[in-house]
Image (cartoon, rainbow, N blue to C red):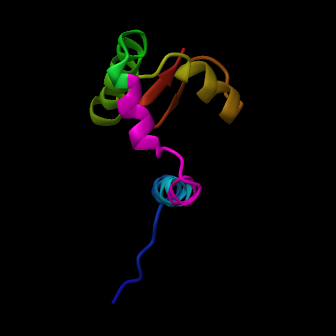
Amino acid sequence: MRSLQLTKAEKAWLGLFVYVVIADGYLMRAQNDTMSICYGKWLEQQRSRRVCIALTALMIAHLHWRAPLPGQKILRRIATLKTKNQTIGVYEIQ
């Protein structure tokens, strides 16, 4: 039987999940609003609703259709110390 080998990205997703569970647990224990409750309150307010919907739509587009995030090409270039016009994975940095 082959052992489960996780990629660094999969480990990062698991780490994010663990962080959210721990943070929400801490917030519940301290009798504060959880992140979900806070998000719901933002959606109830007209000013913050537009920002929440726009950011949520951007994140869904990024995760489901590989839409680049604003500044993603520059961040990738800085993080990988690559110069212009090099291809990394499915992205071509220009």
Image point (31%, 26%), residue name:
61
Q: Quadrant of the N terminus?
A: bottom left
Q: Eyeballing the image, is 46 above or below 5?
A: above
Can you give x and y, in whole percent of width and height, for residue 23 in the image?
Answer: 56, 54
Q: Is residue 34 visible?
A: yes
Q: Nearer the viewer, residue 76 or 59?
A: 59
Q: Nearer the viewer, residue 54 or 14?
A: 54
- Please, which residue is most extreme toward the top here? 47
- Please, which residue is most extreme toward the left here? 65
Quarter of the figure with residue 85: top right
Q: How many marks?
A: 0
Can you give x and y, in whole percent of width and height, for residue 74 in the image?
Answer: 61, 19
Q: Main secondary structure of the magenta part?
A: helix
Image point (45%, 28%), residue name:
91
- Please, which residue is most extreme toward the front here? 31
Q: Is residue 67 visible?
A: no
Can you give x and y, in whole percent of width and height, for residue 4 in the image?
Answer: 41, 76
Image point (35%, 26%), residue name:
56
Q: Is residue 77 left or right of residue 89?
A: right
Q: Eyeballing the image, is 2 above or below 78?
A: below
Q: Is residue 62 left or right of residue 77?
A: left
Q: Quadrant of the C terminus?
A: top right
Q: Is residue 82 left or right of residue 59?
A: right
Quarter of the figure with residue 53: top left
Whether residue 12 appears in magenta in the rendering, the answer is: no
Q: Is residue 26 left or right of residue 91?
A: right
Can you give x and y, in whole percent of width and height, for residue 70 in the image?
Answer: 50, 16
| Numbered range of the magenta stretch | 25-42
Q: Eyeballing the image, is 38 above or below 77?
A: below
Whether residue 33 appears in magenta in the rendering, the answer is: yes
